[in-house]
Image (cartoon, rainbow, N blue to C red):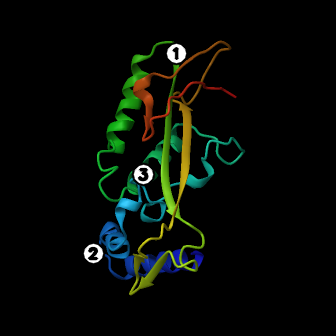
Amino acid sequence: MKKLLVFTLITVAVFLGNAQNTDYYDRMEYVFGNIDKTKVTTGFLKEFGIRFNQVEAYNGVISSNNLVDKTQWQSLYSSLYTMRVGTVAQNMTAPNVVFDNLTNQQGNATEDVLLAAQYYTYQQYKTNALSNGDVTVTNDQIFDVAGRNPYDTQTVFGAAPLNKQLQGDTFTFKLPSGLVYTNTSLNLNQVQVI
């Protein structure tokens, strides 16, 4: 699968470098146009999109390389938005609308520090999808193999304060339901600020 992804990325890079009038999404539609999009049950396919950060790192387990501020939060959301395939996630709110909402919500908060959260599931190709016979590649196009599922389901989670700077020593953090973005039915029941 690694070879498939490297091949796809090199092909896309060469194609985009040589054909300036061709849109990125037209190329992705060509490469992924023959996959069974109903197998991408979340509506998000990592390899289809543009990753503005390493979405894999934001899996809900805190580490030093996945801390989230407002800028990272927006990059995660934008990355997910570009990963949409099929019809399942086509109604996802456009990033500019979401980012305007973040700005407006924080502007309306007086002393509270508002948090925004996103929790999405997405799919990515299994690392061995090609060698395992889950997909084939012909003429730079990926084809699913009937009866096989080439995808793993992953999670992306990020929560961030909308304020870039805080002054003082006492804060009230709030996470309004209008600032929680998700494609799951799970409820957020706890937030920890570290």
User: On the image, which quarter does residue 129 sit in?
Assistant: bottom right
CA separation in Å, label 1 and label 2: 47 Å
Label 3 vs 2, first from the N-terminus:
2
Residue 25, image x and y in percent? 33, 66
- Give amino acid for label 2: Asn
- Residue at left offset 69%, top offset 41%: 62
Label 3 CA crowd tier, 10 Å (few <14, some 14–19, many 20+): many
Give the residue pinned by disc 3.
42
- Seen from the viewer's position, the closer of residues 170 and 130 is 130
CA separation in Å, label 3 and label 2: 31 Å
Residue 163, image x and y in percent? 53, 27
Label 1 vs 2, first from the N-terminus:
2
Residue 14, image x and y in percent? 43, 81
Give the residue pinned by disc 1.
112
CA separation in Å, label 1 and label 3: 34 Å
Label 1 vs 3, first from the N-terminus:
3
Give the residue pinned by disc 2.
21
- Residue at left offset 47%, top offset 70%: 148
Label 1 CA crowd tier, 10 Å (few <14, some 14–19, many 20+): some
Report helix, strand or loop for mark 1. Answer: strand
Q: Nearer the viewer, mark 1 or mark 3?
A: 3
- Give amino acid for label 3: Thr
Asked whether disc 3 touches disc 2, contact meaning CB atoms under 8 Å apart, the reply is: no
- Residue at left offset 41%, top offset 86%: 138
Q: Nearer the viewer, mark 3 or mark 2?
A: 3
